[in-house]
Image (cartoon, rainbow, N blue to C red):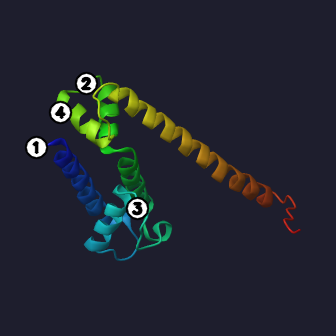
Amino acid sequence: MPPPALLSLYYMAFIILGAVLLWMPISHHGDIGLGEALFTSTSAVTVTGLVLFDTGATFTGFGQAVIATLIQLGGLGLMTFAVLLLGALGIPIGMPQRLILREDLNQTSLSNLSYIARMILIIAVACEALGAGLGLCPRIWLGRAVASGFPLDLSL
């Protein structure tokens, strides 16, 4: 099977797995049909940002973790994760996996694919940590200041 077709099957498998996990009662509050779960899973893996429901209000912590994982898999690439996992386990990466990774990363050469995958992960984690730090730390500090009785006047 050609690498692009195999890569498409991997993405489809993760979309279906994500939909089944999101459809389970442990993943949501209320009533979510299989169609809505499939749409949400597809949107997460393809990183389109389309939603049918308020994610924070509709999905439980488990459902939100499934969505976050699907977004990470889609955003960074399934094969990037696979290569990093195989490398961490000490399993050599064969030629078929390298061909699929080359397609996933849109590269023309087979050289330095593991290095590129590592750099993608390092940069993504650094950007996410920086964004979380800049976005969450001020909210946490302000919340603690208000909770401790610190007078906070933001009026001009």
Q: Are marks 3 and 4 in contact (CB under 8 Å)?
A: no
Which residue is label 3 attached to? 48
Q: Is mark 2 on a helix, strand or loop?
A: loop
Q: Which amino acid does label 3 sit on?
A: Thr
- Find the distance from the CA under tag 3 to the CA under tag 1: 27 Å
- Find the distance from the CA under tag 3 to the CA under tag 4: 29 Å
Mark nearer the N terminus (3 vs 1)? 1
Q: Which amino acid does label 2 sit on?
A: Ile
Which residue is label 1 attached to? 1
Q: Residues within 10 Å of mark 2 (few under 14, many from 20)?
A: few
Q: Do the residues labelled 2 and 4 touch (CB within 8 Å)?
A: no
| Relative depth, front residue between 30 and 16 | 16
Q: Is mark 3 on a helix, strand or loop?
A: loop
Farthest residue, direction front: 108
Mark nearer the N terminus (2 vs 4)? 2
- Find the distance from the CA under tag 2 to the CA under tag 4: 14 Å
Which residue lies at the image location 40% right of the left edge and 49% below the top edge? 75
